[in-house]
Image (spheres, rainbow, N blue to C red):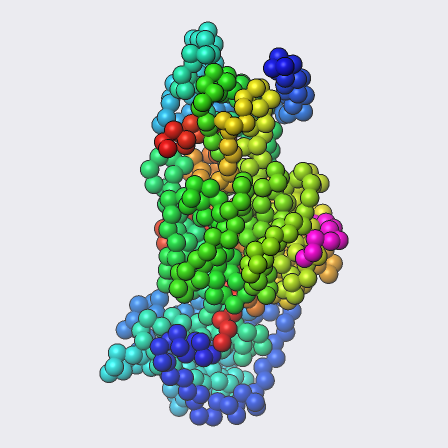
Amino acid sequence: MNRFVRRMGGALLVVLFGATAAVAAVTIHINHGYGQEFPIAIVPFQGQKDWPPSQQPAAIVRRDLAGSGWFDCLPSRDYLSDPHHQNQVQFNDWRLVKATALLIGHMQRLNDGRVNVVFRLYDVDKGAQIQGLQYTVRPRDLRAVGHKIADAVYKAVTGMRGPFNTRIAFVTMFPHGAPGHFRYRLEIADAEGHGARVILRSDQPIMSPRWSPHGRRLTYVSFESGWPAIYVQDVATGQRQKVAAYRGMNSAPSFSPGGRHLALSLGKGGYPEVYVLNLVNHNLRQLTFGPSINTEPAWSPGGGHIVFTSNRSGGPQIYEMTSNGHHKHRLTFHGRYNADATFSPNGKWLTLVSRRQGQYHAAVFALANSTLDILTTTGLDDSPSFAPNGQEILYSTVVGGHRVLATVSLNGRGRRILGIRGGNISGPAWSPFRHP
Amino acid sequence: MKMSKKALMVISLAALAGCATKEAVKPHKATTTRSSSAQASAAGQSSQARSRSMSSASLTSFSHFVHFRTNSAVISGVNRKVVKENADYLEAHPNTRVRLEGNTDERGTAQYNMALGWRRADAVKHMLEVLGVSGKQLTTISFGKSRPLAMGNNPKAWAVNRRVYFDYKYYSKG
């Protein structure tokens, strides 16, 4: 929270009177079985019309929650009243539209240019406030406030931490000059793809950004020297370091959960093999051997295991080994193309790309029983990664002839296409939670 | 020595042809602005190009693109001829260096495609060496799927993009 407050530039955060007691008194139980959605009414906040839609808190909350797969956001045209303050709430109005939760709020520009935003969340059945908070922020931080409110509602209703006030990293490419030539940008945006900030530009490919465990650094592949090399870059300062530029292929870096090691795939021995690089003493250890492709290593949350893609059996399949390179065994047997697996935060699932009838889908693999579920209907998916709460997957796909970023919830009901404009967008990675 | 190497290559090529399916992709037209005549001669194998002495062949008289089947790094069909023409040129010009650039189509994952592109470039390098080209003239790189020549999301564009490109300019531009 400290970090958040600092980022907001001295934002004020006040728990509204009565809210603490209400949190203790009210319990909402929802069935965590897949397919269950929680009906919520979100009244447009008083005063938000003065702001563009991308900065209207209630609009941001609605979009976040609707895409999460856990909420049925009731359309505002059905509402019988539009309360903004505590004393305007008539719970019967909301029982009639079958809402079980109600979010109201208002916002006001202050004399010093900052904006005050207040929200209250109610349990309609019990007629009680669950939570109420206010924020005072600069206008540029209004989106973050919207995501914070969405996180608060998500937590209150599902019991899980909300994934909305997080970031994504991705690569955009724009044709430049002759065919086959592009300009590439490594960018960071909020979890909805807004507020993108370019952290690296190059006229050579940039690929596969991955976050460090606390979201302070990114590692990626850049060809800016003419040859592929692996870099680690501090997101806030822009400071960066070339950590691997061996002869041949340098690819597929990913941070260990402790942040001291990178797993990566190097071609210096003649074949693409998985190695672990110690970022402190620069020791390099080879974990796979043999004349096949071994790449796309990803660590388990505890750091004890690494999954990777290998074509040792013919086509690409997912294998697992210990982080010392022992006990290699094949995990995926369904289909002839399974690649680029990453662990869910709880270590129980993998998300990966799986081919069915020539179509490449984002999929989820359950480690407990080896089931593989396809999550999408699109056919050119790539680079799936879990939200930090493990409930959604971010991936790249092609919709209407454009490569875009999309999310799908694990229960399959929440789907969004992120609103990023321009270019060919690929290689997304969802950041971890912000840490204090 | 060189002769026996070539004989060996013929045998291994025959073996490759035996296991390859017959959907080899012809070098695609309008891939680069570099040499429309090279594309035409490679695709059409005009008698003019065939009758030309190899040692005097110019860089623009043969294709610089080797194409591949989906998820494959096997050089098959007409693409073997492309490699052979480049090998002849490189043998006749031992001071010329070339960068072999492996690429893939957009299907599948970015980093697996990186590795696949590398395997394609290595396959071309290996065939060139078997044909007698010095390894000192050759370097390999892969761009995976990050540098498509054709921008469509369709089989035709994918066929164009599954390629190894002989970049003769990489080392000549200094």
Asked whether residue A331 is drawn in magenta, I would say yes
Residue toward you, B128 or A387 = B128
Quadrant position of residue B8: top right
- Residue at point 41%, 69% (across, down): A60
User: Hey, which quadrant is residue A343 in on the image?
Assistant: bottom right
Give above or below for B47 relative to B89: above
Residue A259, given in percent of the width and then of the height, sits at 56, 63
Q: Is residue A422 left or right of residue A22?
A: left
Q: B93 above or below A414?
A: above
Q: Inspect this view and state whether residue A247 appears.
A: yes
Residue closer to the observer: A201 or A37:
A201
What residue lies at 43% left-to-right and 84% top-to-bottom?
A133
Specify the quadrant of the image occupied by residue A311.
top right
Please count the marks in the image: 0
Please report the bounds of the magenta region as a residue range. A323-332
Q: Is residue B147 left or right of residue A212?
A: left
Percent position of residue B168, x then y: 42, 27
Magenta stretch containing residue B131, yes or no?
Answer: no
| Residue A186 on image: x %, y % | 41, 54
Residue at figure coordinates x 52%, y 92% from the top left:
A21
Residue sitting nearer the eye, A188 or A268: A268
Observer-nearest residue: A435 or B77? A435
Instruction: Work out whether residue A415 can be spotted.
Output: no
Magenta region, mostly helix, strand or loop? loop
Residue A15 percent location from the top left of the image: 44, 88
Q: Residue furthest left?
A: A111
Write the residue at 40% across / 16% down: B58
